[in-house]
Image: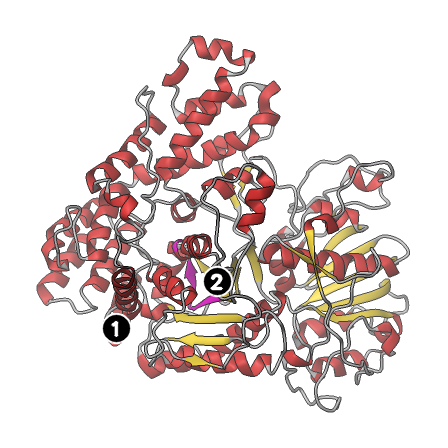
Amino acid sequence: GAGRRCGGVEGRSGQRVRVGGPRRRRHRSCGVRASRQHAVADAANRSTEGRKRVPLSLALADQPAASPPAPRVHACGVPAENLVVVVSSGPATPGSAQETPMSALSARPRSKRGGGGGKEEPAGGLRERVRHVVQNDVLRASAAKAKGWMVLVLDAAATRALTPVLGLYDLVEERVTLVESLEKRRQPFPEMTAVYVVAASERSVRAVCADWRGRDRAMYADAHVFALDALDDACMALLGATPELAARLRALSELRLDFHALEARAFDLGEPGAFRVAPGATREAALADADREAARKLATVLATLGCGRPRVRYRSGNARCRAAGKLLLDRLGDRASDVPCDVLLLDRGDDALTPLVHEYSYQALVHDVLVVEGAARDRVPLASAKRGGEGAGDYAVLTDKDALWVEFRHDHIARVVSRLRARTTEFLASNRGAADLRRGKGAELSLGDMAAALRAMPEFQAATAALNKHMSVAHAALDEFSKRGLLEQSQLEQTLATGRDEDGAKKRARDVAEDVAACLRAGKGDAHALRLLAIYVVAAGGRLKESERKDLFGALNPDPVQQRALLCLAQLVAAADGIPTRDDAAAHAAAASSKTNAAPASSKKSSRTPARRVAALRAAMKATFKSSGAAVPDAEGDVESRYAPPAKALVAALCDGALDVDLYPSLGAGPTPARDDRPKARSARKATSRLAANSRKDAYGGPKVVVCVLGGATYSELRAAYEVAAEKGRDVVLGGSRLLAPADFVASLAG
């Protein structure tokens, strides 16, 4: 609901977080993100016998387990029987510090719970796969060997990776009583087992060894160490130089989870510095280290998805993507798998426009105009979400577990408002407790009034928590959107981005320069106004006349940092000769349209004029803030408006096998698909049950498609990935060096 978050492993200021255990206390907070206090779960102190539980295996599909190579003892001297997974390549010479290719990694063993059969594999997307690995191969595997309660010790990288997938209930069920930060001083618990999840770096391994070296009394009873990626021989030598740890080491495993699984189809490689606007060779040299890390982490994404050696596509002439593709293939080696995969590498520098344009879809708008917190970027602090007695620290938590969020996040905000109003009105009309409200304002309630009415009815709070949360979020987003006058600005952005106005007439950037200048003066130099000027710079190809520069810069009056950002952006766009991926997308869309000799897929939208699209959004804003009995027009199909991210057409062409091989050559032959590469036929009849709908939704044909945007992907591109997956019947996963909110991209422009 909109209350405190119930789940996650992220602690504030490195404080110890207690999630259950031998010490019996009253439960004060249902979240593990605590500030200077312990979050104690009562459920940990109650017996689970007799409780009805749904086994995790019921939601999983079987997959044959790979045959692991014969294990051997590492240079650390730990006996082989103590190691869950032993991996290495080449001679185990201490200090040789060579990297281990992914092909040398042995398969993770099946969980000791549940017996034989094939290896269990989740069917809920990338995020569920990661959760499955952590729950089974880390928590349950450690609990099977531990005698009592366990302490989970995470470094900063592991905290970011595990927070999106782990909840409080997951920890308590596997006897984890405490979550602590590796970087902070900690109290010894010699009677408990320590489960370390850390980055595969010398710094983190040294910190683990420091817990055991030179102590009269052991800090923990024993240790289970899990690395997010392959440990090199230098790290193994550090472990070998700590006999106190080696004597108590019960498991050493490499997880291949060095990324953030934010959604079923979204990943973040956690490389915030992977976008620079310095042009040409200078930019490529500056990004070499970031791209090397991105390629390494992308290899762990493919391993988690079960993919073998992929076929990598990149834009011809883009040296950055080509180099990253080679690094990825070298990292994967000759890893064999029966899951074929296509990887499309894109460069944010080839499309600097998409992160700047305001979008009307629910998720994109929330991340654009509201503050979103947390390592998983799923917590929206809302003062309007307060409920009696809980204070102002409430959050709306937006995750894949929220059915309304999954249903609405890619819809036009006007449609979201319309649906929320309809469902709330239906609820109020069907409950006798709302009789007074019905006799009062009835259908004239605004969205804010409806949210307040639901919060005022304690007897209905359990049933209306999700509606209340999304009404509060939608109200806050549209409030900010309206207060900043972004409707008119966004229409100018659409004209600049597409080169056509609302009536379809061609417009050059200079044709709307006066309108842009007037909007910049009204924006008073804020970040949203800066984005409009940045879009103008991109639309002009990075080349402004002196008169244009003087008029527009004078209207915005940017500070020195903003001036530098605009100058760097102009250099980047000029060096790329515009927006190459937009031109490529237009060419592929035209080819697809001419080949089918039919109307484009967006023909459903053409029946709705641009004026009606704008009217729908205006009506939604009016219905949100004013008591009006007028119905909100349905805005279904208007999410993209006139501008669509170029990545959508490119991914669709890749799924259709129509991506031009001259424009987008390939590296690596890739495996032969084991299944029919064509999308599976689907019945035109509507699914009559949720089970039928889910089974049809997960029925994908052809190789997996993994799209990685070096420099950062956007939420509009993520929406496009979901849409292409649904339209083409293909399993599409998208991510990048990071998942960018517009404010992040604007901040990165200045370097």
Magenta region: 706-716
Q: Is residue 188 visible?
A: no
Asked where in the image residue 81 lies, by quadrant, the reply is bottom right
Q: Quadrant of the N terminus?
A: top right
Q: Position of residue 354 (x, y in %)?
A: 33, 59
Asked where in the image residue 691 lies, by quadrant, the reply is top right
Total numbered labels placed on residues in the image: 2
Dot label at residue 494: none
Say which of 56 and 393 sits in front.
56
Task: Say whether residue 345 is left or right of residue 392.
Answer: left
Q: Does 691 appear in magenta?
A: no
- Identify the main secondary structure in magenta: strand
Q: Position of residue 742 (x, y in %)?
A: 37, 55
Q: Position of residue 293 (x, y in %)?
A: 53, 75
Q: Position of residue 543 (x, y in %)?
A: 17, 69
Residue named by callout 1: 571
Residue named by callout 2: 735
Sequence-first disc among 1 and 2: 1
Contact (CB < 8 A) between labels 1 and 2? no
- Residue at position x 18%, y 58% in the image: 553
The type of residue carrying mark 1 is: Gln
- Residue at position x 37%, y 36% in the image: 415
Q: Does 710 appear in magenta?
A: yes
Q: Quadrant of the C terminus?
A: bottom left
Q: Is residue 289 visible?
A: yes
The type of residue carrying mark 2 is: Gly
Mark pair 1, 2: CA separation? 26 Å
How many other residues sit within 10 Å of disc 2, few (<14), some (14-19) or many (≥20)? many
Q: Secondary structure at mark 2?
A: strand
Say which of 219 and 503 sits in front.
503
